[in-house]
Amino acid sequence: MLITRRADFSSSHACYRPDWSEERNRAVFGHSANPRGHGHNFVLEVTLEGAPDSVTGMVLDLKDLKAIIQSEVLDPMDHRFLNHEVPPFDRVVPTTENIAIEIWRRLAPHFADGPARLHSVRLYETEDLYVDYQGDAA
Amino acid sequence: MIQLTRRYRFAASHRLHSPALSEEANDRLYGKCNNPHGHGHDYILEVTARGPVEPESGLMMRTAALDELVERGVLSRFRQSNLNDAPAFQGATVPTTENLVEEIERRLREGWREAFAGPWPVLDRIRIQETKRNVFEVTVNQQ
């Protein structure tokens, strides 16, 4: 069974590489290349896979998942400029793809020993653009 | 591997009527959707591409290239149109949203290689929301 918890955070990012020319940054990243940054109301969906416990009837207490998302994602990323304040985005371009992968990396250790398995991370940059990441294995 | 989904919107009308069926059978099968004058929807189209993230840029694909392909191949053709007027729906193929998904898949496959050189990204999934209550989806498994 899959269970999903949704959370949102507002952050700014700039998609550019300081080691590239302005022209190259503009060609690859378009408007997002402005080094001063711009922001989004990111919406995160974290999906776990597991079987309901026979006593509690839960795959995982969603309060626990909420607390993990709070400490691993919202506390460090909400109302921050990702490039300047949230490693590894001082050296990795904080594209929506890379933010989703980083969120997966931060969450995955919490679910390494079960009972629930981290199934997927879906990150909406806007209502009209989102990425799904299911780990390196997928 | 990562999937990236873009959402697009277009308004179009259609009439569900099969030339293979009698007037009575069409009326029974399609009900309100068989109204001879047609009716319309605000379709929401989701197109998903899949591929590895390019390490240097952190991008899986150039989203603008997908936007251009969908605009050229799908939106410019169907936006503010009567779907029954499209060549694909003038014969025996009824413009149900099932058939619309398949027509959009055909159109995206046709332009894909021109939009994206190289093996990645691939077309992964097409999903159309006809109304809030009716959603149609195909997994493409493009090679």
Image (spheres, rainbow, N blue to C red):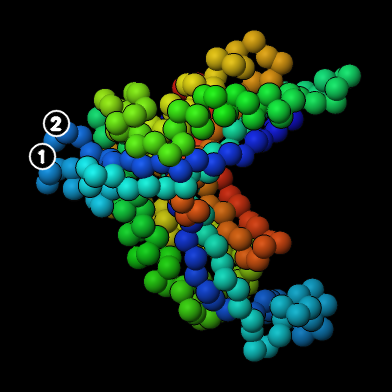
The image shows a total of numbered marks equal to 2
Placement of A125 over or under B131, stated as above or below: above
Give the CA separation, mark 2 to mark 1.
7 Å
Q: Is residue B113 visible?
A: no
> In front: A135, or A65?
A65
> Amino acid under label 1?
Ser
Q: Which residue is at 42% across, 48% downward?
A: A40
Query: B21 and B42: which one is in front?
Result: B42
Q: Quadrant of residue A116?
A: top right
From the viewer's side, name the closer residue of B74 and B5. Answer: B5
Percent position of residue B1, x then y: 43, 30
- The answer to which quarter of the image holds residue A20 is top left
Question: Disc 2 residue type?
Answer: Asp
The residue singled out by tag 2 in the image is A19
Quarter of the picture holding the N terminus of chain A? top right
Q: Secondary structure at mark 1?
A: loop
Q: Which residue is mark 1?
A: A21
* Local crowd size for mark 1, using a 10 Å CA cut-off: few (<14), some (14–19), many (≥20): few
- Residue A31 left/right relative to A75: left
For label 2, the SS is loop
**Rendering coords of residue B107 (x, y %):** 43, 60
State the residue at coordinates (49%, 79%): B81
